[in-house]
Image (spheres, rainbow, N blue to C red):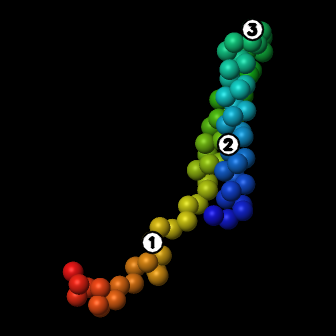
Amino acid sequence: MTAGARGLIIASGLCGALAVGLGAFAAHGAGPQIKTLLTTGAQYQIVHAVFAFACVRPEPVFTQANLQVDAAQLDDV
């Protein structure tokens, strides 16, 4: 995994945690005037965190080296 991918995963995790915290504060501790603002902000933040995590490109499972098969291995089957 590259450093950029690792950083994007960490950033999206922190953004998601912040969104959950803001949503919890909006639901339990905020006044009525700020409640809708925090709720909307938390929803936008969690959507952006999910999409940032989705932008991470996973490493390929099957590479060219993994797919090469020797004739001797085929004879054993």
Kindly identify the amino acid type of the residue bearing the numbered disc 2: Gly
Q: Earlier in the sequence, mark 1 or mark 3?
A: 3
The total of numbered circles placed on residues is 3
Residue at the spot of label 3: 32
x and y percent of residue 32 in the render? 74, 8
Residue at the spot of label 2: 13
Q: Earlier in the sequence, mark 3 or mark 2?
A: 2
Circle 2 sits in a helix, a strand or a loop, which is it? helix
Location of the C terminus (image quadrant): bottom left
Residue at 68% x, 56% y is 6
Pick the residue in front: 56 or 1. Answer: 1
Mark drawn on residue 62? 1
Is residue 72 depicted above or below 34 in this figure? below
- Label 1 neighbour load within 10 Å: few <14, some 14-19, many 20+: few
Is residue 45 depicted above or below 11 in this figure? above
Residue 36 visible in the picture? no
